[in-house]
């Protein structure tokens, strides 16, 4: 039984640590003395051949090791207490970068979203709320925006957040020298594409301008109804020219970085841990948490063992297996939310047999989507429409419903009655177990419902991506996640000019619908246009068959309050707090709290 | 000795150059590039990124650029980890792997050599059977099974050691043990075979006939000669252990460099792949040179490098 197991509390931690170190020191001294004695006795053994002394020496070593073991167990990992006002989470991997102009991944955004804020910010329902901008005007039928900045908004070094910080940031994002992958998010801004592609070199021609310290003007080349969402997205956050010029590539290091969000980057131990501290001077009020520890634990079983041992307070899909999830599904610690990430089966419409729309429709109708939540076990939502629920234009009936009989009839009409003469095709998917389960289910259903056999081909992730982008196969599995909460982020993917459209489907009618919808300022009309486009995509032309929407599943310790999940899967910790009363008597190592 | 070290150094340089060249070419032949992502980027953005990293230049120009940087000790930049050089990454990760690797190596020797010796001295008897059973288990069980078992027993049930992470010296115990068990079993089998061979020598019989105790004969005469084959495997083993283990680092969330041998390839992080390969090659060369010197110390009849 470890010493002080129940008595220890956070306030006694320093004393406890001191005691542990003292004991270790005493044991080391004892070990040293015994070793000296043993050396002497060893000499004595050699000289006199005394068996008794030899045994005595051995027993001393044994006692020493026993003491060391006791010390080890008493000063064991229980010294890692549940820490007051500290949230400990697992982000699974090293963020590739905290330069929000160059970062493109969710791990980096999990950190950046808590240390930086932009012109606007997401509410819990993902609508846009004022942040650095107190308000904004939409002028010239949606082609010009004027943002009025909050004079209280401060950088962590005390300087005000100025309109020129946004002007500099957006121009830097678009500068070809920055090599920013997400520069295309600003292509709606006047001359942004031209500057980014090197057609013009004068950054001042880009349609973003600081009119004064508190006013930012943005000119778009065409109205974009979704534009306001981009101002809450990490790549459009402001940056400090003076600091980037001073520190060069090293400006994101913990001792150089200056931010304007609710938390500050305190420590970044690469490949291991990031620590954020509370920004006491955050202009919208300091957060309740004093510290956030973001561990980078890649192995699910390890992360979940740490959670069960009270060494992590919050874990998500990255940190547990499906059997772990099953154990906790009915626990009060378990929560789930739908994500704006749709999975689909894609058809290359330029390659037979999927160049025939009836074949595509038949395959889509032969897939029973209800099997996917059962085989993946993470609460997935079956989907037939491309626009996910909760977004403008969503209609559950946009896509083709499961109807094997009709599917067989369509296949027969396409020239393959009973699946006869259907050519051999391979379904391409990335080498991942969860994806393999999905494509095997599709393969099985097509065999049972349409009597056609497709074989499966897996490729390593990067090879798969290259194959898809270079010469996509007749049929493949893919997915798409939203960057901002607007149907545009989904519908634009299958327009003719989009580089992510691996179906090679080009349809001017669809392009026109999406283009009109993206510019439409009337919300109702815009919704109708997207709904129409979604139906055209998933029911009439079917270059893709959406199959299911992913979910985020999390486990949260009872003492963590105010944790809100959102469909974009960005973790905001500003409103999170730790209920200290529930921490009383809880130690790292005490297993499972509420089941 | 100095001339020997100098000779080994001069031989190592072209070896490293060949390794760097082959790795440079091989990584570019592998399908998929560093900037392939789920969201395909517009061509002009790909062009910007390639220009930033000089990947828009012909391969031979990229090669000369890389070699020029390498000659100055610059291992290049990471395409995955923005604003971090390969030198930065390896300098952060290598000390951790070194620490873990040295602990693992010491543990492996501390377990393997006595176990193998005990087994050989008690050949065919109960201790030998036990030792051989343990070594068979040690060799057969992969690291991820050993790691999971140790976490389960010491971390979750007995609760005397941390489950994972890299916070204090206590956090080093389970990863070191996991890392050490396989090599310990291997060293143990090697030591047993070697000790058995030496025990048959005439001079061992002579030492015993002169009245030297069994333990003194083993420690002073047998082990010293029996350790030559063990020292041979310790060279590459040292290089393997101190450059990190992907499995151990993955299971225990240890921030070492072992993971980069795998992730750098899956990310197509070209310079990082070459960097890790070169570091491994350098350590292997150094470790083998040290082994040659140790040979000489163990048995002065052996010529250094001979």
Image (cartoon, rainbow, N blue to C red):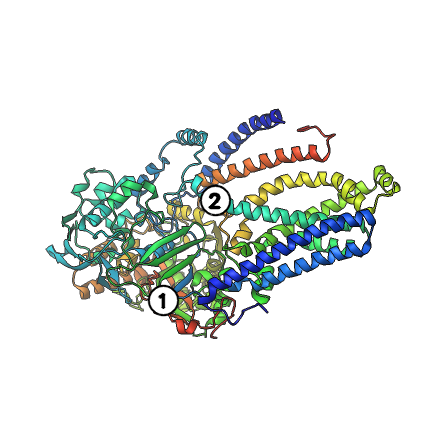
Answer whether residue B125 is visible to the viewer in this image: no
Left or right side of A208 for B82: right
Few, some or many residues within 10 Å of mark 2 (<14, 14–19, 20+): some
Q: Nearer the viewer, residue A188 or B205?
A: B205
Few, some or many residues within 10 Å of mark 1 (<14, 14–19, 20+): many
> Could you say which quadrant of the image residue B72 lies in?
top left
- In percent of width and height, residue A384 lies at 35, 65
Q: Quadrant of the N terminus of chain A?
A: bottom right
Left or right side of A260 for A14: right
- In percent of width and height, residue A23 lies at 57, 60
Name above or below for residue A145 compared with residue A405: above
Discs 1 and 2 lie in a common subunit: no
- Mark 1 — residue? A338
Q: Nearer the viewer, residue A459 or A260?
A: A260
Q: Identify the subunit bearing mark 2.
A: B
- Residue A280's mark? none
Q: Residue furthest right?
A: B209
Name above or below for residue B237 compared with residue A128: above
Left or right side of A400 for B6: right
Q: Residue furthest left?
A: A140
Left or right side of B266 for B160: right
How far apart in space, not on screen, are marks 1 and 2 (Cα)? 33 Å
Answer whether residue A179 is visible to the viewer in this image: yes
Mark 2 falls on what kind of element? helix
- Mark 2 — residue? B265
- In percent of width and height, residue A492 lies at 27, 54
Q: Nearer the viewer, residue A253 or A541?
A: A253
């Amino acid at each position: 039984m470890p010493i002080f197991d129940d008595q220890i509390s956070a306030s006694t931690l320093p004393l406890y640590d001191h005691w542990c170190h003292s004991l270790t020191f005493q044991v080391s001294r004892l070990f040293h003395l015994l070793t000296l004695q043993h050396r002497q006795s060893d000499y004595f053994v050699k000289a006199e051949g005394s068996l008794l002394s030899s045994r005595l020496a051995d027993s001393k070593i044994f006692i020493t090791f026993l003491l060391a073991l006791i010390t080890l167990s008493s000063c064991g990992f229980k010294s890692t207490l549940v820490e007051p006002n500290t949230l400990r989470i697992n982000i699974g991997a090293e963020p590739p970068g905290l330069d929000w102009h160059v970062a493109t991944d969710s791990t980096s955004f999990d950190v950046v979203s808590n240390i930086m804020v932009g012109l606007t910010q997401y509410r819990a329902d993902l609508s846009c709320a004022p942040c650095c901008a107190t308000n904004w005007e939409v002028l010239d039928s949606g082609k010009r925006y004027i943002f009025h900045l909050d004079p209280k908004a401060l950088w962590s070094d005390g300087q005000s957040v100025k309109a020129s910080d946004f002007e500099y940031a957006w121009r830097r994002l678009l500068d070809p020298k920055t090599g920013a992958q997400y520069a295309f998010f600003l292509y709606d801004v006047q001359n942004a594409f031209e500057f980014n592609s090197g057609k013009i070199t004068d950054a001042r021609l880009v349609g973003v301008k600081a009119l004064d310290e508190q006013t930012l003007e943005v000119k778009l080349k065409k109205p974009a109804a979704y534009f306001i969402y981009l101002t809450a997205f990490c790549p459009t956050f402001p940056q400090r020219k003076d600091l980037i010029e001073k520190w060069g590539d090293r400006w994101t290091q913990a001792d150089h970085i200056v931010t304007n969000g609710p938390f500050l980057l305190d420590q970044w131990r690469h490949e291991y841990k990031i620590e954020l501290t509370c920004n006491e001077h955050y202009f919208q009020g300091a957060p309740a948490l004093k510290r956030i520890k973001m561990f980078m634990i890649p192995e699910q079983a390890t992360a979940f063992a740490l959670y069960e041992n009270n060494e992590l307070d919050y874990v998500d899909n990255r940190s547990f297996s499906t059997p772990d999830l099953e154990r906790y599904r009915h626990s009060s610690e378990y929560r789930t939310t739908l994500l704006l990430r749709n999975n689909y089966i894609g058809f290359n419409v330029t390659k037979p047999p999927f160049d025939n729309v009836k074949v595509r429709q038949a395959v889509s109708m032969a897939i029973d989507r209800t099997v996917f939540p059962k085989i993946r076990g993470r609460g997935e939502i079956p989907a037939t429409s491309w626009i996910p629920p909760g977004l403008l234009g969503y209609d559950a009936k946009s896509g083709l419903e499961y109807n094997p009989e009709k599917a067989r009839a369509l296949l027969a009409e396409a020239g393959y009655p009973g699946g006869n003469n259907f050519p051999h095709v391979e379904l391409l998917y990335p080498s991942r177990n969860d994806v393999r389960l999905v494509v095997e289910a599709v393969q099985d259903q097509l065999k049972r419902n349409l009597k056609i056999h497709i074989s499966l081909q897996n490729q390593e992730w990067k090879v798969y991506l290259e194959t898809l982008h270079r010469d996509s196969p007749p049929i493949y599995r893919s997915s798409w996640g939203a960057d901002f909460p607007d149907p545009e982020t989904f519908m634009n993917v299958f327009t003719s000019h989009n580089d992510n459209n691996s179906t090679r489907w080009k349809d001017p009618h669809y392009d026109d619908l999406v283009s009109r919808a993206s510019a439409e300022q009337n919300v109702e009309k815009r919704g109708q246009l997207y709904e129409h486009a979604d139906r055209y995509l998933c029911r009439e032309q079917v270059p893709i068959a959406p199959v299911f929407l992913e979910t985020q599943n999390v486990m949260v310790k009872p003492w963590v309050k105010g944790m809100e999940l959102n469909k974009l899967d960005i973790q905001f910790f500003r409103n999170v707090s730790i209920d200290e009363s529930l921490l009383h008597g809880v130690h790292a190592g005490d297993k499972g709290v509420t089941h | 000795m100095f001339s020997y070290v100098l000779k080994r150094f001069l031989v190592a340089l072209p070896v490293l150059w060949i390794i760097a060249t082959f790795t440079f070419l091989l990584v570019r032949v592998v399908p998929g590039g560093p900037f392939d992502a789920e969201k395909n980027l517009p061509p002009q953005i790909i062009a910007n990124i390639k220009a930033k990293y000089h990947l828009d230049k012909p391969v031979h120009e990229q090669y000369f650029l890389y070699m020029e940087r390498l000659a100055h000790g610059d291992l290049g930049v990471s395409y995955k980890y923005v604003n971090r050089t390969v030198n930065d990454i390896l300098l952060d990760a290598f000390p951790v792997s070194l620490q873990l690797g040295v602990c693992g190596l010491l543990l492996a020797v501390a377990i393997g050599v006595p176990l193998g010796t005990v087994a050989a001295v008690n050949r065919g008897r109960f201790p030998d059977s036990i030792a051989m059973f343990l070594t068979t288990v040690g060799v057969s069980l992969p690291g991820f099974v050993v790691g999971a078992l140790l976490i389960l027993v010491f971390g979750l049930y007995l609760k005397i050691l941390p489950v994972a992470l890299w916070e204090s010296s206590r956090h080093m115990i389970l990863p070191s043990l996991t890392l050490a068990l396989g090599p310990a079993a291997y060293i143990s089998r090697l030591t047993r075979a070697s000790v058995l061979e030496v025990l048959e020598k005439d001079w061992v019989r002579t030492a015993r006939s002169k009245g030297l105790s069994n333990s003194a004969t083993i420690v002073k005469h047998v082990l010293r000669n029996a350790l030559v084959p063990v020292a041979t495997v310790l060279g590459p083993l040292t290089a393997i252990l101190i450059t990190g283990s992907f499995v151990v680092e993955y299971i225990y969330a240890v921030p070492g460099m072992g993971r980069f041998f795998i992730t750098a390839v899956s990310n197509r992080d070209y310079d990082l792949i070459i960097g890790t390969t070169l570091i491994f090659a350098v350590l292997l060369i150094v470790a083998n040179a040290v082994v040659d010197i140790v040979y000489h110390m163990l048995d002065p009849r052996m010529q250094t490098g001979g």
